[in-house]
Amino acid sequence: MKKQTVSRRGFLQGSSAAGLALVGSGESRAFGQSQVAATPPQAGATQAPVPGISGQGEMKFRVKHNSTLLPAAAQKVLVKAHGGFAVDRRPDRGETYFFLIGAGILQIAPDLNSIRLLNTADAMRRVNLHDTTIWYDPKDGTPSLIFPANDAGKIFTTTLDGTLLSTLDAPPPDHDFEAPEVRDYFQGGGNFAPTGATYLDGLYYISTGYSKLDYVLTARVTAPSEVEWGDLAFGGKGDGRSQFQTAHAITVHPNSTRLDVTDRPHSEIKQFGRYGHYLSTLKAPTGSLPCSIDYLDQYVLVPTLVGPDPSKGAPIYLYEDGRLISTIFPKADLGLANFEHNHKAVLHKAGDKLCIVVQAWNPGDFAILEEV
């Protein structure tokens, strides 16, 4: 796979903001708070860092499991890891799903102490699935998984046991998207490179950040086995408040119809309504490249590809009620040498402990962190 070049120019200047700053209608404030401190919390001068522990305050983390937890077939291809995770957060469940190219779909047990490889269709196993999302059919609650294949230009839908239900190919050149720029792009032979996909009220919302298009496209979902392109599209490549430079992941905010899109080079998470109208922007700490956003109870997790201080490796930011409460450095503090770049991460509760399941990119790696 072609190595992706990450430029740090322009992202390494200035101090880091304490929280995600909310920008909209000419207003800037901390995400969920009315004030913003000058810098993110760091270990105090009177408290020396503890080897093998990272984070601040009450939210410090250590390594619960490293990549040795993976099945042998997954360990062989781990260096190519370039995807994301989905947690089944229904009561009495708790499995986490992800994918490794060359191995297949993997399922992490609810206690996070074992991982099994699922039967995976050959058409999926040979390509890179850039993210994983779980959704539930509103008719009967049946869960399904969505996998966007950025290199193959396809969206796969499977059952939780890995059975392939549908494959959505790239939009045909004559498909009538409501945005003329999108119609022109595909009529001109532009590539379809999906980087994220989520489900909301009968539609797949698909980000296309690895292409010159950089729009969020939609597809109508009649059933997990019946998916076809819709006409709604929004965003586009650019520096406007509703545009992206790399729309890397897309997430539905819990208990709402808001869509959060991580715009990696802009250090922003942009928020949209279900019909594509721009709502606001969350500013990540200056100098960071946010890859995704995940919500659990009062917590918000933002893993980054690059942070303000490259010598420490990329940080993972943990927020509580809109306030940055902990910055975790898997490479510098936890000794995970391959975690120069975090790709995707999710929060998970194992017993009474908050855990972080995280994947590194270039080279790929895997770890599960637990609250100390």
Image: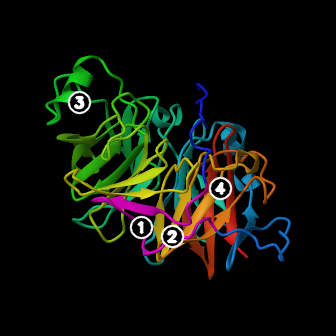
Horizontal and vertical percent for residue 106? 57, 51
Distance from disc 1 to disc 3, alpha carbons, whole Å, reads 34 Å
- Going by the image, does 36 lie left or right of 215? right
Name the residue carrying label 2: 36
Span shown in magenta: 15-40
Residue 250, above or below 54: above
- Looking at the rendered structure, the kind of residue marked 1 is Arg
For the residue pair 62 and 300, the one nearer the viewer reads as: 300
**Tag 1's secondary structure?**
strand
Give the labeled residue for mark 3: 182
Q: Disc 1 and disc 2: Cα gap in Å? A: 7 Å
Gap in angstroms between the C-alphas marked 1 and 4: 22 Å
Q: Position of residue 308 (x, y in %)?
A: 64, 50
Residue at image mark 4 = 315
Q: Which sits earlier in the primary sequence, circle 1 or circle 2? A: 1
User: Residue 111 location in percent, x, y?
Assistant: 63, 71
- Residue at 67 percent of width and 80 percent of height: 58
Query: How many C-alpha atoms fall within 10 Å of the one at disc 4: few (<14), some, or many (≥20)?
Result: many
**Mark earlier in primary sequence (3, 4):** 3
